[in-house]
Amino acid sequence: DNSLSVRKGFCEAPGNRTQSGNHPEDWPVYQQLLGMLLSICLCRHVHSEDYSKVPKY
């Protein structure tokens, strides 16, 4: 029964065609926003230092 065959991938209708490849410069977002999201993800697990025990001069 060919009508129930599993198809993989995305539809490539003429009105729903995307550019081939993955180029961040073609994404419809700002470069600063991408950098901010990347820094948030990378710095999420960085712990802040406790400076309350440092002697004050």
Image (spheres, rainbow, N blue to C red):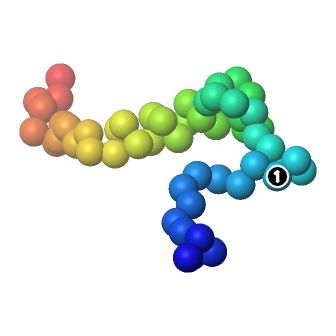
Name the residue: 22% across, 42% down.
47
Name the residue: 59% across, 70% down.
2
Q: Is residue 30 visible?
A: no
Q: Compared to 21, does 3 lie above or below?
A: below
Q: Nearer the viewer, residue 39 or 7?
A: 7
x%, y% of residue 46? Answer: 26, 39
Q: Nearer the viewer, residue 42 or 26?
A: 26
| Residue with the mark numbered 1 | 13
Q: Is residue 7 visible?
A: yes
Q: Quadrant of the N terminus?
A: bottom right
x%, y% of residue 44? Answer: 34, 45
Left or right: where 43 falls relative to 30: left
Amino acid of disc 1: Ala
Label 1: element kind: loop
Total labels drawn:
1
Q: Compared to 36, does 15 lie above or below?
A: below
Q: Compared to 23, does 36 lie above or below?
A: below
Left or right: where 28 falls relative to 33: right
x%, y% of residue 27? Answer: 72, 34
Name the residue: 88% across, 47% down.
14
Q: Nearer the viewer, residue 43 or 34?
A: 34
Count residues near mark 1 (Cα–Cα under 10 Å), then give few for <14, some for 14-19, many for 20+: few
Q: Compared to 11, does 50 lie above or below?
A: above
Q: Nearer the viewer, residue 47 or 30?
A: 30
Query: Which image quadrant is residue 19 in?
Result: top right
- Most extreme residue toward the right, as rendered? 15
Left or right: where 26 falls relative to 54: right
Q: Quadrant of the C terminus?
A: top left
x%, y% of residue 43? Answer: 35, 38
